[in-house]
Image (cartoon, helix red, strand yellow):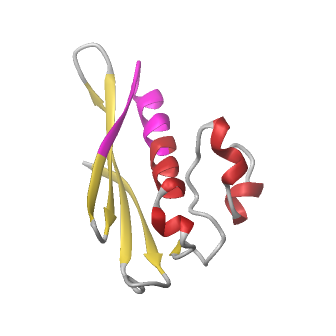
């Protein structure tokens, strides 16, 4: 079950005008852990993965950080063609501490990210 969705867009390059939906699913209890899956609808193909944790909160938190990491490590970010509210403003997803120096725009100034 999808619990949250954010629509990013490509603003330049070969795929300009294409939307990039990011969908977060409800964390699920597994045998001895929790999993929270997500998907990113890149024009080259949908990327599906999960964050895992000892409870649903940790799984959700780690899934959100994985989304942020994938957005910032993607070629569309490096090409400066990926946008949320505007080019160069960031995407509104947290990243792990070691990656915080690469954040841009609002992401770079937001507390807790």
Residue at image coords 46%, 59%: 74
On the image, the x and y values in percent for residue 71 come to 49, 57
Q: Residue 17: x, y in percent?
A: 40, 86
Task: Give x and y (percent) for residue 15.
Answer: 37, 82
Residue sitting at x 37%, y 76%: 19
Please say if 99 is above or below 78: above
Above or below — where is 59 with respect to 8? above
The x, y position of residue 51, in whole percent, is: 38, 34
**What is the span of residues highlighted in magenta in the rendered image?**
49-64
**Compared with residue 19, is residue 78 higher up or lower down, i.e. above or below?**
above
Q: Residue furthest top?
A: 32
| Number of marks in picture | 0
**Depth order, front residue of 9/75:** 75
User: Residue 26: in sight, yes or no?
Assistant: no
What's the residue at 50%, 83% (across, down)?
11
Please give the name of the residue rendered at 47% of the width and 28% of the height, measured from the top-left corner: 58
Relative placement, left or right, of 109 versus 91 is: right
Left/right of residue 112 with respect to residue 49 in the rendered view: right
Quadrant in which residue 109 is drawn: bottom right
Residue situated in front as seen by the camera: 75 or 72: 75
Whether residue 60 is in magenta: the answer is yes
Above or below, 68 relative to 19: above
Q: Is residue 22 magenta?
A: no
Note whether residue 17 is visible: yes
């Amino acid at each position: 079950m999808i619990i949250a969705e954010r629509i990013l867009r490509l603003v330049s390059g070969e795929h300009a005008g294409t939307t990039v939906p990011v969908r977060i699913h409800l964390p699920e209890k597994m045998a001895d852990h929790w999993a929270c899956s997500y998907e990113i609808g890149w024009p080259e193909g949908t990327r599906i993965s999960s964050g895992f944790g000892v409870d649903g909160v940790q799984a959700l938190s780690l899934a959100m950080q994985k989304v942020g990491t994938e957005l910032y490590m993607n070629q569309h970010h490096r090409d400066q063609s990926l946008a949320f509210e505007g080019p160069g403003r960031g995407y509104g997803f947290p990243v792990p501490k070691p990656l915080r120096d690469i954040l841009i725009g609002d992401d770079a100034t937001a507390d807790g990210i």
